[in-house]
Image (cartoon, grey):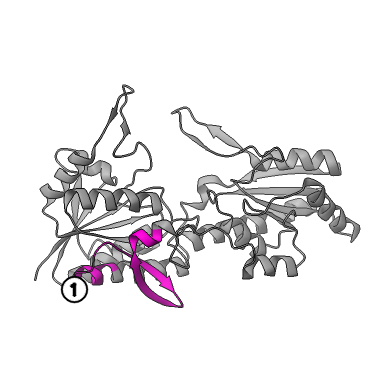
Amino acid sequence: MTKRIGILTSGGDCAGLNAVIRAAVHHATQLGWEVVGILNGTHGLTCRPVKHRILSAEECDGNLLRRGGTVLGTMNKGGVFKHEMPDGTVRDLSDEIIEGVKMLKLDAIIGIGGDGSFAILQKLAKKGGFKMVGIPKTIDNDLGKTETSVGFDTAVDVATEALDRLQPTAASHDRVMILEVMGRDAGHIALSAGIAGGADVILIPEIKYDLKKVAQKIADVKAKGRNFGLVIVSEAVKTIEGEKAQIKFADGQVRYGGIGQYIADELAKITESETRVTVLGHVQRGAPPTPNDRILASAFGVHAVKLIAEGKFDRMVSWSNREVIDVAIDDAIAAYQEVDIDGALVKTARALGISLGD
């Protein structure tokens, strides 16, 4: 039976989103379905007319596969049930969003997002009586019930390349280079990139660090004849006093930022080394997806359409043991995935002589 399905991206962008869209469109088209791209996430559903466009297999070609970001646009601020308006008032936009879904006459929606997006979309689906499936995307890799999410591999690749590029400069100027990376409250990017990029020190939120031990690692490196050091730190690492390093932007939003400079300043005091900081920021989000992310995104997009065809909803596509499976969205939201401090990668880092600051 011919179906009309919607697809939207929600939350922060990352590499691989367009590859998901392409895969879903191609598989749905093979089934004779129509795919509606909802623009700017749930925000597009509040607009009248609803912001959308029909997606064809012809336009979703190989060029789309290679592009970073999302051609549908996304939204990661403002909320839905308590949306702050420009005049400072707060409104519940859920009824408008549900009405927008009904206007599009959709049989189901594929939501590409993280835990926060899934929680919102699931609540909307239950209230509005529409059907949905989820595809996990987050550079942070902190979503439970999946071994990896779309966007993580590319973020690690970018961070690793940054360490590769910082190393020659560090060696040329006898410096300790500190690289601050994203990850929200989990240290997956820092840990993976730190191992891949040959960092001397990896600092992640899950492991409390001692600045004196970090300084000692730098001293040990120099005592062995090397004139530089590489440190990678996850954005959510706290100061020694237990405070979060945060930045308030002009629009009032508060985000992690600044821990790299803090570590650099403190290390300079203790070691008398010349330190420099690089903050990757959104560079980790916007790159063309790696082959691994393209493959993962393609497999996820196909499986999401398959779930709709089988009438299985309220499910999230997942990667487990080299297979694409699906799990209950509730379970995925509840199972936050931080770095396992007794896991294989932490053990690998320690066995390589990398300091984790403890």
Q: Residue furthest bottom?
A: 322
Residue nearest the observer in this picture, 263 or 15: 263
- On the question of residue 294 being in view, the answer is yes
* Residue placed under numbered mark 1 in the picture: 30
**On the picture, is 308 further left or further right than 233?**
left
- Tell me if residue 319 is in the magenta stretch: yes
Name the amino acid type tagged 1. Answer: Gln
Quarter location, residue 137:
bottom left
Q: Residue 168 location, x and y as percent?
A: 73, 56
**On the picture, is 15 further left or further right than 309?**
right
Count of number-bearing discs: 1
Q: Residue 264 location, x and y as percent?
A: 73, 42
Residue nearest the observer in this picture, 262 or 282: 262
Range of the magenta residues? 304-332
Identified at 70% across, 38% down, the residue is 262
Does residue 179 lie above or below 221 as drawn?
A: above
Identified at 31% across, 34% down, the residue is 83
Label 1 environment density (alpha carbons within 10 Å; few <14, some 14–19, many ≥20): few
Q: Residue 104 location, x and y as percent?
A: 13, 50
**On the picture, is 197 further left or further right than 156?**
right
Residue nearest the observer in this picture, 129 or 63: 129
Instruction: Locate the N terminus and report the quarter of the image it occupies.
Output: bottom left
Q: Residue furthest left?
A: 1
- On the question of residue 67 being in view, the answer is no
Identified at 17% across, 49% down, the residue is 128
Q: Residue furthest top?
A: 87
Q: Residue 247 location, x and y as percent?
A: 55, 33
- Under circle 1, the secondary element is helix
Quarter location, residue 319:
bottom left
